[in-house]
Image: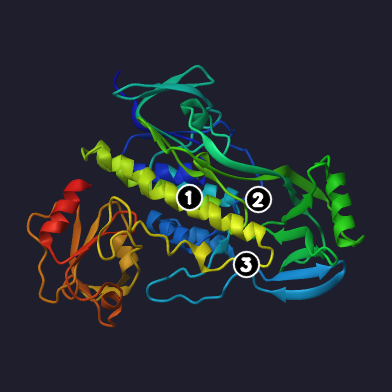
Amino acid sequence: MNPDVDVVVVGAGPTGLTLAIELARRRVRVRIIDRNPADFYPGTRGNGLQPRTLEVFHDLGVIDPILATGQEYPPVQVYFGRDPVYQGHTQPRSEPTPDVPYPMPIVQPQWRTERILRERLAGLGVAVEHDAEMVGFDQDDNGVTVSTAAGSSIRARFVVGADGGRSGVRKALGVGFTGTTRPAERLLLGDVTVPGMRRDVWQVWVDPERKQVQASIWPVAGTDYFRMSAPITADDTPDLTLAGFQRLLTERTRRRDLTVTTLTAATDYRVSMRLADRYRVGRVFLAGDAAHIHSPAGSQGLNTGVQDAYNLGWKLARVLAGAPDALLDTYEAERRPVAEQAIGLSTELLDDKEATPDERTFQLRLSYRDGPLAAGGRGGDRAPDAPCRTADGTSTSLFDVFRGTSPTLLCLERSGEVPEGMSDAVRAYRVGVDLLDPDGHVRAAYGDSGYVLVRPDGYIGVDTSSADEVAAYLTAI
């Protein structure tokens, strides 16, 4: 059977949308299906966008609306009952540097992130197909046939399950989801309006005797809503009504002057930490929450999923264009260890009540240095940004130079030349000739000799003094 498309993405959350954009901008034939209706509102979740994810969004061309509609984390105001006892910041404060243009995480509700990504995808000619639930698939040596609840089928070269923690794709593959669920770690979550509630701080009420959080109210930027959360015990029967949230708010804050006027997206959330045993079975892949779920501490889940898609997208496109299939095996080899680390970090932050997020949560230090696509001293590390100029003197930055779908080769020798035989698919720049470095930021980040090949996903592939090693690396990918 001839494929209808190259890739079917199942699930239109941030992971699936990022992957679809990555494929569509490489002119890969992609369809993205989602079981939810177009007006589905999942509630304000997935709030924290980490600095490395902001760099991904820079490359995807959505950083401006993301920053314009988000906000930095507000200060936290802690109360013992009605009494304020502390106000401060929950995130380390940083200023942009030449190599890190987005040093701070921002608060951006997942539903708005999805809307921005959907608009970007639509600009590439691809629309999310809503009310399209996958009910099964069959794969063979040449492709995968996806069946939907509506009775239709789609034939594709590859399928990616980005369909959440209860992933139907993962279950159909029979892939284990190893980890734990903690019955005692339960939260009632909901989006509420509370007239008169402060919007300039994140308010947290703590039991002064047990030192345990009793309620949390977070203002959702650009809306009238707050995100309310309140822990409940394993034996509690949750009341997901407006009256139930009103009762909790009054009891936990000891303030009878606060009235919950609306409630939406109420959820009884149970903390789980799980990791898929495999990320690939034949022509079917798992990404995002379908592959890993985390505690909410440290805002690691959504960010790890977006970067799964960023890693997988260019590899699928290259294999579809003729690269060796083994390139696709590097997806699990690189991304599964990252998810394992992220789960460990978020669990640590959950269990240590004194711990606060720090630069480990920013995901800027994540590296594939020990992975199968890392060569040379810095191979596998994040490629830093640097202000520079084009040959005609126009101001730019390395992130703008890297933006796009191709690898980028930096030739660092002051008298160096681009190696012969470079493919048209590789953008090569001689630092000091094609890219001017008047303030020395490029050389401070990358040195002044040899070659650095930056992968399409912003990591250093090979760092070498040998043009032959560069050529060999490009053959592999």
Residue 160 in sight from this viewpoint:
yes
Viewport quadrant of the N terminus: top left
Spatial CA distance of label 3 from label 1 is 20 Å
Q: Residue at x 58, y 35 (%)?
A: 166
Q: Describe the element under mark 2 as helix, strand or loop.
A: loop
x and y percent of residue 141 in the render?
A: 29, 23
x and y percent of residue 443 in the render?
A: 26, 77
Residue named by callout 2: 44
Q: Is residue 126 above or below residue 369?
A: above
x and y percent of residue 415 in the render?
A: 10, 75
Mark 3: amino acid: Thr
> Residue 71, located in which quarter of the rendered image?
bottom right
Which residue occupies the foreground of this view, 329 or 299? 329
Lower sequence index among marks 3 and 1:
1
Lower sequence index among marks 1 and 2:
2
Q: Describe the element under mark 3 as helix, strand or loop.
A: loop
Q: Residue at x 46, y 28 (%)?
A: 173
Badge 1 local density, few (<14 within 10 Å), some, or many (20+)? many
Mark 1: amino acid: Ala
Lower sequence index among marks 2 and 3:
2
**Are the residues flagged by discs 3 and 1 in contact, CB closer than 8 Å?**
no
* Marker disc for residue 339: 1
Which one is closest to the eye, mark 1 or mark 2? 1
Residue 424 in sight from this viewpoint:
no
